[in-house]
Image (cartoon, rainbow, N blue to C red):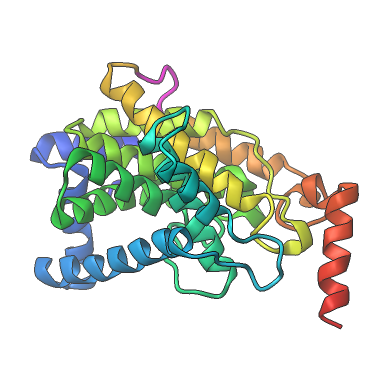
Amino acid sequence: MFASNGEELIKICAENNITLAEYALKVEMESSGASKEEIYNKMKNTLAVMKYSAEEGMRREVHSVSGLIGGDAYRVNKYLESGVNLTGDVMVKAMARALSSSEVNASMGKIVAAPTAGSCGILPAVILTAAEKLNKDEDEMVNALLASSAVGMIIAKNATLAGAEGGCQAECGSAAAMAAAAVVEMMGGTPEMALNAGAIVIKNILGLVCDPVAGLVEVPCAKRNVAGAVSALTTADLVMAGVMSKIPFDDVVSAMYKIGKAMPAELRETALGGCAATNRGIILSKKIFDKNK
């Protein structure tokens, strides 16, 4: 019952009266031969790793091996605890969690690449924060992760998840689309609404290059995780309010892939363009490589 695109995914879910999570579960059971219980237990382990990486940097200052990033999740959490912020506790907590995952990743800690290490902070930050706000339990969070995987499978099949092939639009864009779709399902939205959320998120990040300073997924990657998490949460609210994407999910994914292919190599994770090639980017890169000599 594997869907080859978003349109087929919506059709399969409608014909079988199932959610995105139920679809992903059936696909995994058929492809792996694992039972529902085995899959849920594995996903609960994944969720536990996500929770750790999303919150470790909030508890203490975590610094990357390179020294490029570190301590920002802790700072944002302290700001949250002050009780004075502009965008609300949900947004600020999601931002802190996204930063934490990026910092834990860059410190050689354990994370879940969902779908990539460079975009590892978006899905945990969004799922954990939305579940907290909506009073969802562990099984419901696992369902949200399963729903996100249904969307990720479609993107992987028809485009790419790799910054080296499609720019950061393919990494953080895909992660944010997966997260937005998961939250829509968590809030009771239909598979069609979930894919509308995914489409809107990707449209808003089309053309984003992959330009890591010194070739490390730290700068500007960590803060792009923040932006992706915020985009996913706000887009979920848009869709639940009845806002739909004028351009279908499949068309948006196709556009993302074509744009990625059109990007010069300098803007696809080579650290030869964009932020990596700025004056400060070059200085930071030299400091790292000189330190390691």
Furthest-bottom residue in view?
A: 293
Q: Which residue is located at x 22 percent, y 38 percent?
A: 185
Instruction: Say if the magenta span includes residue 14.
Output: no
Q: What range of the chain is rendered magenta?
A: 244-249
* 256 lies left or right of 143: right
Task: Determine the residue positioned at 20% across, 39% down.
Answer: 134
Depth order, front residue of 151/279: 279
Write the residue at 40% across / 25% down: 248
Residue 205 position in % (x across, y down): 57, 34
Identify whether 286 is placed above or below 199: below
Q: Where on the picture, by quarter, is residue 284?
A: bottom right
- Magenta: main secondary structure: loop
Q: Quadrant of residue 51?
A: bottom left
Quadrant (top left/top right/bottom left/bottom right) for the C terminus: bottom right
The residue sitting at 66% across, 73% down in the picture is: 65
Residue extending furthest front?
A: 82
